[in-house]
Amino acid sequence: MNRYLPLRLGTALIAVLLMALAWWMVLAAERGVQSLSLTQDGVPVTLLLPAVTEPVPGVVMAHGFAGSERLMRHWALTLAQAGVVVALPDLSGHGRNQAPLDWWNDPEQFQRDVQTALDLLLSRPEVDHRRLGLLGHSLGAGAAIDAGRLRLDDVSAVVAISPGQSEVGPDSPRNLMLMAGAWEGPFLAAANTLLEQAGGEGGDPLQGTARALTVIPQAEHIGILFRQDAHAASLDWFARAWDLSIPDVSPNPTLAWWLLHLLAVLILWHALVPLFAQRESPSLLGLPPDWLDHTRRPLLRATLSGIGATLALIGIGEVIYLDGLGGMLVSPQFALWLALAGLFWLALGTRPPRPEWADLGWGMVMFGVLMLAFGVLGAKVWLAWWPPLHRLPYLPVLTVLILPWAVALSTALLGREGIRGFALGLGIALVTMVTVGIAAALVDGMMFLLIILPLLPVMLALPLLVSLPAQRPWAGGLAMAAFLGWTLTMMFPLI
């Protein structure tokens, strides 16, 4: 161990320098743009103000379902650096907005939120009231289209990204650009339908009748938000509608710097953890001599557990209405599925070692590493990561529900380190993706998971990389459960 100490310390120093560089570059991307957190008629709005001396155009940017204003920030900074004032609202039920989502009884709720943010722009002296636009993604695309139709005198252009069904016409809303990724089939089909209803390609931007469809190649539902060609297309569309020359903006690489920061934290962790982790034999961990029997065939056990959890959740759904369980959409059903899968997994014979007080300390340290790697800088780039007070009660409940599955997974990886352990963990993540996908297709209120389910292996890769070197199942399980519980607490809307 000692002969590798200089190498480990040198690697750790390089990782710290890379982390500092990432922070420096992310903060540099915001130079010249002032960020204000405001509330307008109960709607939290982040206002991005470029450094200007005279009124400039303004755009409201609306996020999609399970998003927040932070998810649109990457795109918004591109507009702000081009000299546009950007208003980023948290729509009802999402992020910091304490108004519950109630689209069953109030389908106009989201377009009112967009109009509220538009009114905030109209109240600002920095904004040219003759040049206003709306931009929305997914659910926010529908809200932007509806608000644009109702505010024809104020809104001169609308950009609808990955839209669903909406009501449009040849001259309402004004100057409508539809946009979708080539890899998001249903949304691309919806965009083509809307284009046909709006009168097809063409029209005069100065008359408000311009219509267009932009397809972003090799882009899916979330990735389209971070594509520079999509950002540039929206800027060009607004410039045409406003009859205004907007300067070219250099690509905004903040997401790449966030990824570098994440990688640097992992390098730092893997360089330092062997200096502190006490590698113990299975017997010292409280496992019997035949401990390998308890972790044998982990992929088969994970598959059977996932199938059992899916069938159990379908059965529970026949007795209890699961959609909106506990006052939140999607997150409780997903956490309940993980709880059932974890209990099945443990019942099939997977046995973790006896927990120790040291596991609590290691679990907290691992969770801190996950927070540092994923969330702290991510909150500056694209994540709504810090839960407001009204969301905090969900955090311990979701964490406890996820814990059995996380501990079972960490136990299955015990004794399997390095590439072998990581590959097995991703294999289990893929099995989980398939089995929970079946549940999402069959259980009320879980359908949205099908859109974001491919992100599950990516979300699990990080806690796997953090927990594997320590080989402490209870600690790794606790850190993974808290990390996923935190994410689910912030992600889905409240009703």
Image (spheres, grey):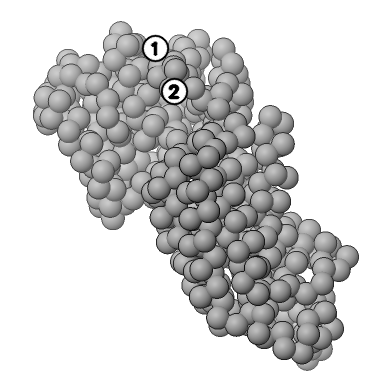
At label 1, counting other C-alpha atoms closer than 10 Å, the crowd grade (few under 14, some 14-19, many 20 or more) is: some
Q: Quadrant of the C terminus?
A: top right
Residue in front for this viewpoint, 475 or 52: 475
- What residue sits 41% from the left and 44% below the top? 447
- Along the polypeptide, which appears first: circle 1 or circle 2? 2
- What residue sits 83% from the left and 62% below the top? 360
Residue at numbered disc 2: 103
In this view, 282 is above or below 395: below
In this view, 421 is above or below 380: below
Q: Which mark is residue 129?
A: 1
In this view, 358 is above or below 125: below
Identify which amino acid the numbered label 2 is placed on. Answer: Trp
Q: Is residue 54 visible?
A: no
Residue 452 drawn at (x, y percent): 43, 50
**Mark 1 secondary-structure assignment:** strand
Distance between mark 1 and mark 2 Cα atoms? 30 Å
Residue in front for this viewpoint, 358 or 45: 358
Identify which amino acid the numbered label 1 is placed on. Answer: His
- What residue sits 43% from the left and 35% below the top? 64
Camera-nearest label, 1 or 2: 2
